[in-house]
Structures are given as structure tokens and as C-alpha cells.
Amino acid sequence: MGHTRQDEWDAHYADGKMFRPLRDTERALLSAHVPAPAGGGRALDVGCGLGELAAHLASVGYTVDAVDWAGSALDRAGAEHPAGVRWLRLDVERDDLAVLGRDGYDLITLRLVYPFLRDRTRAMDDLGRRLREGGAIVVVTPLAATTPEKRRDIALDETEIDLLSTGWERVERLDAEGLAMLILRGRVQPAA
């Protein structure tokens, strides 16, 4: 795998490829731990790929912004899930994030995306500032311990998970059929 450039991701999706489909276990864990607030909520799906998670979040009551830097992925996502999601071509590490919801998000998801971020700390700080009071960031990732060595670059080890968890008041770690689902709440603001 090891895609690190935008053109590689565009080619991946243009060739009809995808990743691990969203499973019922993940849907159930999301519903149990980060349900849409009464009256609806706002969600941001970072690295949405083909839009399966974004479409699911829209179906359970979230207004969803779904971002990916691969235009071919967004084209397929929009065709397969035509309603309920705003699809945005955006690199969350390099582009101006002004197009995102100005009033923040109740939920931000990074499913099978976090290991690919180049500057994880900065990206999480930027995303954490976009959380509404009481909101959560959910990171779903393969674990290094159960990922073949040749695919290690798509997974996190325990040290990386500890680093990801640092700076949050509450961290829940759940098992989603072999993937780690980390629910991060209450971003601790660094001392000025």
C-alpha cells in the first residue's frame, strides 16, 4: 500500500479499488458511543474515501462534511451516496480549512486515515479546535501487532496510540473486529 501522494490515491480509487468496508460492528459502536445529538449534529469525516462512513453518519442524524484529497474517491462517493453529505476535496494538512463548518463539529472521524498523516500532532490540534463542547474525535485504525509487516505503514503500534491519546481528558479504546476504535474527548489546551 504505502500511498503518500495525492496522485497515488487518485489512481487507487480511479482503478476501482477500495479499503475495508464499514462493518456492522463499527456502526454499532459509533451508535452506542457517539450518537447524533438530539435534533441532529454536525460531523466531519476526514479521509472519507468512498463515503461509506459519511453516508452512515448522515443516515443516523448528522449533517456531514466529508473530505478527501482524492478527487476520484469523491466522484465515486457522490455517485454512490448522492444525498445528505457535502463532499469536499481537501487536504486537511495543507489546504485552508475555512470551507469547513464554522460552528464546529460534534463528531470528527478518521477511519483508516490517521497512520497516513504526515504531521499527526498538528493535524489533531487543528481538528481538535473544530470540536464543539462535548464533541469527540474517533480514530479507527489497524494495530501494528496484528498487521503483517509489509503493511505496517497503515497501522499504529502501542507507542503511537499512547501519543495519539495524550492531551485528551477522556480516551475510550474499543475493539472493532481487530481495528482499534479510539474515542477522544475533551481536548486539553496546551499552556500558553
Image (cartoon, rainbow, N blue to C red):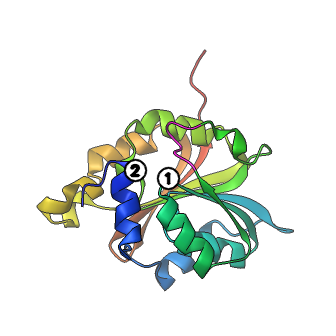
Mark 2, Cα crowd under 10 Å, few <14 / some 14-19 / many 20+, is some
Helix, strand or loop: magenta stretch? loop
Q: Position of residue 62 (x, y in %)?
A: 74, 67
Point 56% across, 80% down: residue: 28
Identified by mark 1, the residue type is Trp
C-alpha gap between disc 1 and disc 2: 6 Å
Quadrant in the rendering for residue 164:
top left
- Residue lying at the far bottom of the rendered structure: 24
How many numbered circles does the render carry? Answer: 2
Quadrant location of the C terminus in the rendered image: top right
Identified by mark 2, the residue type is Gln
Quadrant in the rendering for residue 148:
bottom left
Mark 1, Cα crowd under 10 Å, few <14 / some 14-19 / many 20+, is many
Residue 103 as seen in the image, left or right of residue 4: right
Reading the image, the residue beneath label 1 is 69
Q: Nearer the viewer, residue 40 or 96?
A: 96
Q: Nearer the viewer, residue 182 or 9?
A: 9
The kind of secondary structure element at disc 1 is loop
Quadrant location of the N terminus in the rendered image: bottom left
Q: Can residue 131 be seen in this view?
A: yes
Point 36% across, 44% down: residue: 162
The kind of secondary structure element at disc 2 is helix
Q: Is residue 21 magenta?
A: no
- Residue lying at the far right of the rendered structure: 39
Reading the image, the residue beneath label 2 is 6
Q: Can residue 31 be seen in this view?
A: no
* Residues under numbered marks 1 and 2 in contact, where contact means CB atoms less than 8 Å apart: yes
Q: In this view, does 143 lie above or below 79?
A: above
In the rendered structure, which segment of residues is drawn in magenta?
A: 90-95
Q: Position of residue 153 (x, y in %)?
A: 24, 53
